[in-house]
Image: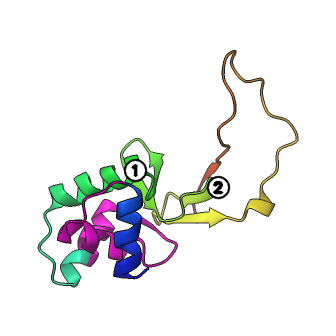
């Protein structure tokens, strides 16, 4: 995604385009991917950036709130930021820490539970935790 595209997206989502936010977006939105905050911080450091850890976390929270990224909680203490924001499914490898998309065609449901009274379905997203057999 180009800087122009990022600035346009910020404008559409009501986000003030600070240099730090643009840097973070350039890393996270460069391609479809799942990155943790620590992975983003590491990539920023490798690129010579001095964006603070607090700024990264605050920016990721803002991006999640505004719908620029999808937050995926894989366990109570680990969150990924997914550049694909449409509802979709994931495999999470507990051993390697890798989060991977599952193609929609590979997940099907024959029946869903009855929804609680006064609610309607917004989305269905499956997270399958896996680990190595070794």
**For residue 4, above or below residue 128:** below
Q: Residue 129 location, x and y as percent?
A: 58, 52
Which quadrant of the figure contains the C terminus? bottom right
In terms of depth relative to the viewer, which is nearer, 97 or 16?
A: 16
In the image, residue 47 lies in the stretch drawn in magenta = no
Relative to 112, 129 lies left or right: left
Residue drawn at (82%, 50%) of the image: 108
- The answer to which of marks 1 and 2 sits earlier in the sequence is 1
Counting the numbered discs, the total is 2
Which residue is disc 1 drawn over? 66
Q: Is residue 9 left or right of residue 54?
A: right
- Toward the viewer: 9 or 24? 9
Residue drawn at (42%, 72%), measured in percent from left and top? 29
Magenta stretch, residue numbers: 14-43
Quadrant of the image for the N terminus?
bottom left
128 above or below 106? above
Q: Quadrant of residue 22?
A: bottom left
The residue drawn where x is 40% and y is 82% is 2
Q: Marks 1/2: CA distance?
A: 21 Å
Regarding mark 2 in the picture, which secondary structure is present there? strand
Q: How is the image coloured?
A: rainbow
Q: Is residue 39 magenta?
A: yes
| Mark 1, secondary structure of its residue | helix
- What number is the disc on residue 125? none
| Residue to which mark 2 is pinned | 89
Quarter residue 27 falls in:
bottom left
Relative image position of residue 102 (x, y in whole percent): 67, 63
Q: Is residue 133 at all visible to an observer of this figure? A: no
Percent across and percent down for residue 43 are 28, 77
Crowdedness of circle 2 by 10 Å Cα count: few (<14), some, many (20+)? some
């Amino acid at each position: 995604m180009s800087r122009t595209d990022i600035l346009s997206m910020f404008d559409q989502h009501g986000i003030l385009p600070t240099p730090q936010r643009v840097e973070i977006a350039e890393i996270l939105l460069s391609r479809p991917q799942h990155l943790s905050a620590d992975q983003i911080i590491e990539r920023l450091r490798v690129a010579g950036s001095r964006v603070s850890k607090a700024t990264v976390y605050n920016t990721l929270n803002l991006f999640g709130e505004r719908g620029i990224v999808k937050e995926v909680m894989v366990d109570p203490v680990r969150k990924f930021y997914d550049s694909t924001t449409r509802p979709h499914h994931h495999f999470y490898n507990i051993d390697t820490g890798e989060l991977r998309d599952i193609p929609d065609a590979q997940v099907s449901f024959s029946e869903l539970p009855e929804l609680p009274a006064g609610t309607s379905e917004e989305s269905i997203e499956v997270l399958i935790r896996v680990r190595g057999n070794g």
